[in-house]
Image (cartoon, helix red, strand yellow):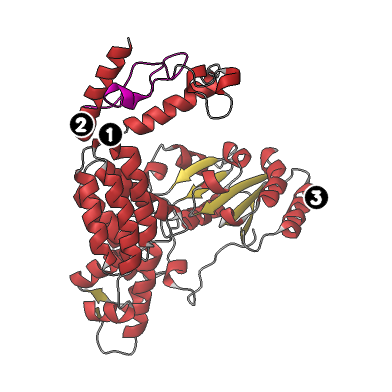
Amino acid sequence: MTGLFEHNKNLLLSSRFLPENFDEFVGQQHLLSKGAVLRTLIEEDKLFSLIFYGPPGTGKTALAKLIAKTTNSEVVHTNATVFGIPELKELTNTIRHYHGQKKFLLILDEIHHLNRHQQNVLLPEVENGSIILIGITTENPFYYVNQALISRSFVAEFKKLSDEEIKKIIISALSDKNKGLGKLNLTIDEDAYNYIIKYADGDARKALNTLDLSATYLAKKETKVISLDIVKQCIPQVSLKYDKTSDYHYDHISAFIKSVRGSDPDAALYWMEKMLMAGEDPRYIVRRLIILAAEDIGNADPFALVLATSALQAVEFVGMPEAEIILAEVVCYLACAEKSNASYDALQNVKKEIETQPLQEVPQHLKDSHRDSEVFGHGKDYLYPHDYEGSFVVQKYMEQEKYFYFPKDVGKEKEIKQRLEKWRQQKK
């Protein structure tokens, strides 16, 4: 086997402290509990291509290395950032040299960095079974990996580790004398535990690296106790995990918008502030609120769109951090406003009508009458509504009368519904 990890005391604890078997593996029980599909495939060495997807430090690489130890395949472990076309062709030539006498397992970290051409070169070898691929990524593979590769792979989503699971890993690392810190006889205070767990935020690698750093710091101290003060000196500030270009970004803005749409101002404020504290552009949040005001509130409260639109100018004028006060006001108002997506539904109804039904022509009396009314009769018999004591007069505005907008019984739109139903009845 090539490219496999071997225990090395000089490696970081997070690289050294890896599970040797399923009993040592912490987390991902939805994938690895006894009888689960993935565990069965691994134990019986009947793998087909896999894609491991999920947040950092959740065991994706650890599981791939565990598979590498148990399989009878020839293992190649590399990173997609350095695995170009020449390396891929060298691998395929090696595989063809053995004429199926060996199975090859390719563990490919950061598979989302492979471009489409590289993925297309890899595809035939995966398709004919010459290569069993384990692609590892923190990005949603359905956006970054060819659908052809996806359809030939078992996609396993790894979940963020719970606080209890992170604590279990810390305890185990402190006591393990072989690949952990057990020989140092260290202990850790409860508040230091909690701080590391919060800092790790479900990422075992961050927890182990913090533990490793704390142990190194204590090496020249007289104490064997990892205290909160020691941990804080190693990681002075608990950071927010948030990448504006990743799935994490889209998951947060999705939770934010759904909270406003669902009339929960408290959850909406939480997700908004978490994004802002992590460095999100407040203008991006306002733009999403403007769309929501039209799509989800609509004519139930027309002022919502006015407020959201004015917020953009106010945020740009004031700037951060005071701009978050403006955002908080707008978010609370929109979350508590009456909701109606009737205007949005009306738009979709019109689109469907145009796409699926015969197109209607403009009726003669609605055509422009400025240039050719005398010759062609355009605009003849048009009824000017202001001549009839109001904004409504019975006349055809489509040759085939059809209804697309159906106001709801909420807020301002309730009045619109009553008015519109009266007008439609008069047409009949």
Q: Position of residue 97 (x, y in %)?
A: 80, 50
Q: Which residues are magenta?
A: 382-409
Report the residue at 30% width, 78% height from top: 236
Q: Say what secondary structure mark 3 lies in.
A: helix
Left or right placement of residue 88 versus residue 309 in this view: right
Report the residue at 42% width, 66% height from top: 17
- Comparing labels 2 and 3, the label whose residue is closer to the camera: 2
Between 173 and 263, the one lying in front of the other is 263
Which amino acid is tagged 2?
A: Val
Q: Marks 2 and 3, Cα distance to the nearest angstrom?
A: 72 Å
The numbered mark, 2 or 3, whose residue comes first in the sequence reads: 3
- Residue 128 - label: none
Left or right placement of residue 147 versus residue 288 in this view: right
Rendered view: 36 above or below 221: above
Q: Which residue appears farthest toward the front when viewing the image?
A: 374
The numbered mark, 3 or 1, whose residue comes first in the sequence reads: 3
